[in-house]
Image (cartoon, rainbow, N blue to C red):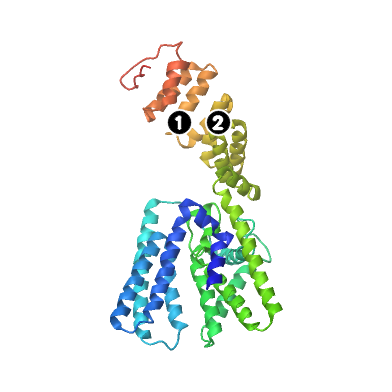
């Protein structure tokens, strides 16, 4: 157990969940999930009915808190059923099943609540045909297994796969996944303790990973189909099996010092290697620009990454380099407006007024209510001498946003050669 905990603590695939502040919900949900499991297991060891009921209620509360932290914990009742199934011989199994059914009902209610909130938030989700979903299930499952065994490179955003391509190997991953699931179902009826424990932790991995494999679409799939954080809690399954296997070898070689030394040496090498990878990857999260550059080096076709890096560069004044990244993002995702909006602003700041006008025209053709784009357009028109058009664009910006500072500056500074009319439908220009 100590070795499993240590492997879990230093595994670099968990860095994203711990070091990235918006993913700390993984840690919080994982804490309540494991606490619920521990409390439920204690309930099966009590000697009085009252203590058992108290423990079950406490486990249910921990479970609810875990789901409210992150919906991935909703699969916990399935883990409970499996825990009951793999522990033959315990008394009062009927009450354990009743408790698990109650937990399942709570999970369904909380899941329905979460889905209703998600639906109201109107986050866009990709539409995948059933065949592409099945393909994705196999590819994602084995990708997670390999990433757990060989966690490098680790990225904040992985390249998005192309699904549906004609290939002889398209269904290999899915067939392999189905074979694994079928094998686990067959082994569930075995009574050997070792087999039961291997099955328990394998099903743990599959159950907790399943929601992110493609059975259900979610908004992040627009950017990538996989992420390190998705197997934060699920990874305990394979880690527990590896730790148990190492412990078994240690006990088997009780009188063989050389073999024990080899086992201990392999464990130490893995722990040190994982720790080093974790330290390196965690350090990136304190340097956002370095993190984005590292990710972009392995995922250069991501328009989002180019836009994010461009925004960071623009913020610190590297306008020429920022403009290049915005242009890359525009080429990779022509329909995304974020790169065009940023490129318009940076082009105006750089004095590339013609480019700024082109980008504002493209943005306003899709979203004509963007006040900032009208203001940028007004400023650029004023700089190239088109005063009347600049004034009209500035008034349009102020009509959409009366507090648009750049539009005021255009009217005050760039069109001073012409008297600015003031009517009731045009905002007055504040004095300095």
271 sits to left or right of 365? right
**Label 2 vs label 1: CA separation?**
13 Å
Instruction: Name the secondary structure under disc 1.
Output: helix
- The quarter of the rendered structure image containing the C terminus is top left
| Residue beneath the point at 61% across and 49% down | 295
Q: In this figure, which residue is indicated by the disc labeled 2?
A: 346
Question: Relative to 60, is 291 above or below?
Answer: above
The vertical placement of 211 against 384, above or below, is: below
Q: Residue at x 36, y 16 (%)?
A: 431
Residue furthest out toward the right:
258
Q: Residues within 10 Å of mark 2 (few under 14, many from 20)?
A: many
Mark in front: 2 vs 1: 2
Q: Is residue 301 visible?
A: no
Is label 2 in a helix, a strand or a loop? helix
Q: Position of residue 257 (x, y in %)?
A: 69, 79
Instruction: Residue 236 in the image: state x and y as whole percent.
Output: 52, 69
Q: Residue at x 44, y 33 (%)?
A: 370
Q: Quadrant of residue 87?
A: bottom left
Where is residue 333, by image quadrant?
Answer: top right
Which residue is at 61% across, 37% downward? 327
From this view, report whether residue 61 is shown above or below residue 82: above
Label located before the other in sequence (2 or 1): 2
In this figure, which residue is indicated by the disc labeled 1? 372
């Amino acid at each position: 157990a100590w070795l499993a905990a240590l492997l879990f603590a230093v595994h670099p695939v968990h860095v994203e969940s711990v070091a990235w502040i918006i993913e700390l919900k993984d840690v919080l949900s994982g804490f309540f999930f494991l606490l619920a499991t521990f409390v439920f297991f204690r309930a099966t060891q009590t000697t009085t009915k009252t203590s058992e009921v108290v423990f079950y209620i406490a486990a249910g509360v921990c479970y609810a808190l875990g789901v409210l932290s992150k919906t991935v914990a909703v699969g916990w009742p399935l883990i409970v059923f499996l825990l009951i199934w793999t522990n033959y011989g315990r008394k009062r199994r009927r009450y354990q099943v009743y408790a698990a059914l109650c937990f399942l009902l709570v999970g369904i209610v909380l899941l329905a609540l979460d889905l209703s909130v998600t639906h109201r938030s109107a986050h866009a989700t990709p539409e995948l045909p059933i065949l592409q979903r099945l393909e994705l299930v196999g590819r994602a499952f084995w990708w997670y297994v390999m990433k757990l065994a060989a966690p490098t490179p680790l990225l904040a955003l992985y390249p998005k796969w192309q699904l549906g391509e004609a290939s002889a190997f398209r269904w290999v991953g899915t067939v392999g996944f189905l074979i694994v699931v079928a094998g686990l179902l067959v082994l569930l009826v075995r009574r050997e303790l070792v087999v039961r424990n291997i099955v328990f932790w394998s099903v743990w991995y599959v159950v907790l990973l399943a929601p992110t494999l493609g059975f259900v679409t979610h908004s992040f799939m627009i950017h990538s189909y996989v992420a390190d954080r998705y197997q934060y809690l699920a990874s305990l399954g394979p880690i527990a099996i590896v730790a148990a296997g190492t412990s078994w070898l240690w006990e088997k070689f009780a009188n063989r010092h050389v073999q024990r030394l080899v086992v201990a040496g392999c464990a130490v090498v893995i722990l040190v290697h994982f720790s080093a990878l974790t330290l390196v990857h965690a350090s990136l999260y304190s340097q956002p620009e370095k993190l984005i550059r590292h990710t972009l080096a392995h995922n250069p076709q991501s328009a989002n990454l180019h836009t994010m890096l461009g925004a960071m560069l623009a913020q610190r004044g590297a306008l020429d380099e920022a403009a290049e990244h915005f242009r890359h993002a525009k080429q990779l995702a022509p329909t995304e407006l974020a790169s065009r909006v940023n490129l318009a602003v940076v082009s105006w700041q750089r004095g590339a007024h013609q480019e700024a006008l082109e980008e504002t025209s493209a943005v306003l053709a899709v979203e004509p209510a963007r006040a900032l784009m009208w203001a940028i357009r007004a400023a650029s028109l004023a700089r190239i001498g088109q005063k009347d058009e600049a004034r009209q664009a500035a008034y349009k910006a102020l009509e959409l946003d009366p507090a648009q500072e750049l539009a005021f500056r255009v009217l005050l500074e760039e069109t001073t050669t012409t008297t600015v009319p003031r009517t009731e439908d045009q905002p007055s220009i504040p004095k300095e």
